[in-house]
Image (cartoon, grey):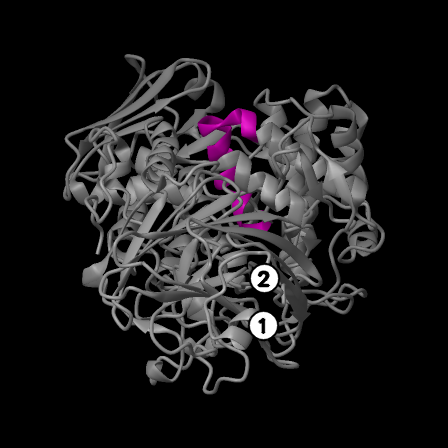
Amino acid sequence: MLSLTSVSSVSVASESNTQWVDTFIGTGGDGHTFPGAVVPFGMVQLSPDTDNPMRGVSPQPEIYKRCAGYHYDDHTIVGFSHTHFSGTGHSDLGDLLVMPITGDVKLTAGTAEKPDTGYRSRFSHDKEWSEPGYYGVELQDYDVTAELTATTRVGMHKYTFNSHDDGHVLFDLTSSIYNFENKVIWSDIRKVDDRTLVAYRATNGWARNRQMYFAIQFSQPIDDYEFINEDNMRYRCMNCLNTKQKHSTIENKAVKMTAGKAVKFVASFDGLKDKPLYVKVGLSAVSRSNALENLNAEIPHWDFDKVRAESKQLWANYLDKVDVEGTVSEKRQFYTALYHALQAPSIYQDVNGQYRGVDGEIHDGKGFEHYTLFSLWDTYRALHPLLTYIDPDRVSGMIQSMLVHYQQSYEKMLPIWSFHAHETWTMIGYHAVSVIADAYLKGIRDYDIDLAVEAITNTANNKVYDAIPEYKKYGYVPMDVLPESVSITLEYAYDDYAIARMFEAMGKTELAKDYYARAMSYRNVFDPETKFMRGRDTKGNWNPDFNAYEAKYMGAFTEGNSMQYSFYVPHDVAGLIDLMGGDDAFEKRLDDLFDTHLSADMIKEHEDIAGLIGNYAHGNEPSHHIAYLYNYAGKPWRTQERIRQIMDTLSSDKPDGLAGNDDVGQMSAWYIFSAMGFYPVAPGDLSYAIGAPQTPKVTLKLANGKTFTTTAKGLSKTHKYIQSVSLNGKPLNRNYLTHADIMSGGELKYVMSDKPNKAWGSEISARPPSMSEYN
């Protein structure tokens, strides 16, 4: 499986933390990650696709498991495409599938059950290897060694035809992840000269009319070629047909392009047995010429090993910002989590500064780096707070990208769940405000602050988005106005809290008061009789068809049930504790969540609810903060127990080592914070609830030049409880950290024991802050 020695020899310092990354972790189960080549925040994700649903092929594979194009259970490869999501619960992309083949050229992929009927190939994990920025595999049916590497905007392929002197490279513009009938709106491919192609396609998928351009170069001239347009006919080199000779130069009179909805191209080569064939593919969302400019700017040569080494070094630069001590398994999990957390949001801008905006127009972004892929319902929780420590400069670019999204959008909204110049309107809340507020409060402000205030205000008061007018009128979203009304109310309330915190810090006192008041809206959907969050209608009536365990599609909750969402008041846990009856009652409710079996019938409509411990669903984001809530009830040793339980039962360094979708790095960010021993329950309050460290020592190298180190003396499988904590040599009796503690640098030292210290962190003054305590 994982191998750091491979077909190509690359020299990178062995002590780099890249050695601990296993790109196959999360490719099994429902992790939905991919193993291919990508650089930090790269626009290109060049990776194998193992069983994409293909046009006209039946039966279709199980689509959900293959959101990233690749699944570890599969044993055939369809080809290698250049764009992928990491860890999402929905999918798209898979742009420009490329497949090296020998022998007769087949034009459909065939099926996994009958691979010989198409161009796909069998492969074995025993002959598959990878490292950050690189992937390799043996294609058994063709005896071809395929290797991939990438820069930010360019993918580079190396194909070694081990036992054939001639071979082909197939480009399939019909292939996509989630490739349903009529997904391709239009495509074309053009032959520019005997080494160069340009291509384009627009697709209807999760994003509608998504456009991508490609520039393709080969390391040797094409000897023969064929255009395929399955809507019309096949076009072969006319000179070759007339003279029965191979085509070699651009001067020959030949067909040079084809366009339509079902376009493919086959390039054929001789003399392959003695040297590898290299292929470079540049991407652009703007134009073919920009794709070619990206290609020439980022890989102007044919040195594959140089690109691979530079890609690996980029990863080393990031992964070496954190030093971890622990077992091999712990290091593999930690650094792979960090690797996954640093793939998105991704660059969506050409080397000349141009990018396609959410308005469909071409914009000049030379003043900042433009990013895409904002899965904000997932990533506001831990990923974006993590990035404020790993790369605060990029955070400013990400926020500026959100702000131009706001300016360009017809609705005048910050992004909700957006990618590739499209807003999908997937999931709920307006969590971009949380990302902006958390960054602003941490002093990250290299973007248009006035525009940020305007965008936040207009987003939180938008008249057409998800019942915001009704939310403001009733103090909650009525269930007879909009589905998922309780979850929406709760998440709006948290977002309003984040806005209040930011406006208060800016001296906008009256505005802050308004949003603090809105942040109390969670109380309006708490039923004092059942002690659960519960839907209610415009007349104030509680939902009569209420079951705290049931997660209905289009019900009152988003990918969850009331058992889970009743704990979603991250900004005012103290207030929630009061509503539930005090510390002991709150502890019991938490225990009920973790200990009460959740019947499969209750969640059958939601495949995202995974990684279960009772009703706790680690595979889905609404549960991620819950284990830390015992701290707020003065029971931090219970949090320590739960964190260890989650780590031991729901994480591993195997392909199925993620409990559910990684969700663009959110689950990985949870792991990183939790391994260090703390977690941002409510981003924007600048506090971190202390859990329990899972590794003996972690050193975080901060952008201000300081280091923050956590050490866990006596940590073991049995010694999972905190006996005492000190910060820079002084006892720390509170069960939370602050942002200032981290940025000041120094050492956070845990002393671990096999028995809980029930006195530590139990006093009310020692608990993490809650809104109702200071408002």
Of 726 and 95, nearer the camera is 95
- On-image quarter of the C terminus: top right
Q: CA distance from mark 2 to mark 1?
A: 9 Å
Q: Are marks 2 and 1 in contact (CB under 8 Å)?
A: yes
- Name which residue lies at 40% across and 80% down: 118
Task: Please tell me the numbered disc located at residue 238.
Answer: 1
**SS of the residue under disc 2:** loop
CA neighbours of label 1 inside 10 A, class few (<14), some (14 to 19), many (20+)? some
Q: How many marks?
A: 2
Q: Is residue 90 left or right of residue 492?
A: left
- Name which residue lies at 40% across and 70% down: 78
Of 8 and 48, nearer the camera is 8
Instruction: In the displayed orientation, state which residue is furthest to the bottom.
Output: 58
**SS of the residue under disc 1:** helix
- The residue wearing badge 2 is 252
Of 189 and 6, nearer the camera is 189
| Location of residue 637 by image quarter | top left
Residue 378: within the magenta? yes
The answer to whether any part of residue 302 appears in the image is: yes
| Location of residue 453 by image quarter | top right
| Location of residue 485 by image quarter | bottom right
- Name which residue lies at 47% across and 82% down: 60
